Amino acid sequence: MTAICNPLGNQFLDSAQLLAAQDVVALKEVFQSINAESCPLQFNFHLHTKYSDGKLEPQHLVEQAIAIGLKGFAITDHHSVNGFYQAINWLEQWKHSYPETLVPRLWTGIEITANLLGTEVHILGYAFNPQHPSMLTYLLGVSPMDEEAQAANAIAAIHQAGGLAVLAHPARYRLAATTLIPEASRLGIDGVETYYAYNNPHPWRTSPEQTKQVQQLSATYNLLNTCGTDTHGLNLLLRL
């Protein structure tokens, strides 16, 4: 296999590992199957590590994902894929150590701060090539500026890198989801984070009113649906 250098150090990923993390066809199939019961015990596509504003070490995040029995997940640190590189290395080590154990599928992920209709929003990117030139400006650990911060450009960059673009928590912004989702769709967004807990409930559960609204808009604009806890703390089953 062709080895690709992990930018965090002297560990190496083989090309097969990275290609599996960029399998956009498989991810689309998952998104098409997502429902209100999928998160947080089956899938989780919104997770943060210490490489942005989360508290978890990537290794500990993966350990929890395995313990929960997740089928698939993505680490969506803000403007960084360093947590992803650490996590996929550790996940591969686990596979070799425990070959009989089922482990979850890990896809590349990112959360980008962007401007949509003059409002700051967050765009999630999935299954993209983290080494593609279009993504470089979004992987610097800080929010993009000027034209690069425009939602249209962030979406285009994710697409150029082979990935899917999703509007995160669409009912959490200054402008209503009924305004933002149609515009995001016009710009080519692939999906919306339909299943989200807006009030950080214990235990985690999707917010019924917002979910219904986003589901209707998603269907109207033929968008994919995703789910995630948006974990920033130490427990993948909660947001904080």
Image: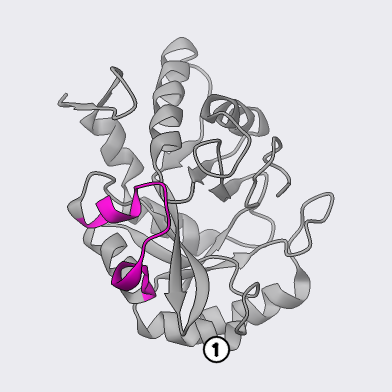
| Magenta stretch contains residue 139 | yes
Picture quadrant where residue 156 is located? bottom left
Q: Which residue is under mark 1?
A: 179
Horizontal side, residue 22 vs residue 134: left or right: right
Q: How is the image coloured?
A: one colour
Taking the spot 76% from the left edge, 77% from the top edge, the residue there is: 209
Closer to us: 76 or 33: 76
Q: From the top left corner, tell me how far across and down residue 226 is, in percent.
A: 54, 61
**Residue 53 visible (yes or no):** yes
Can residue 155 be seen in the rendering of this structure?
A: no
Q: Which residues are magenta?
A: 134-151
Residue closer to the observer: 162 or 104:
162
Residue 208, placed above or below residue 178: above
Q: Residue 56 versus residue 149: which sits nearer the camera? A: 149
Left or right: residue 196 compared with residue 217: right
Vertical comparison of 182 with 126: above or below: below
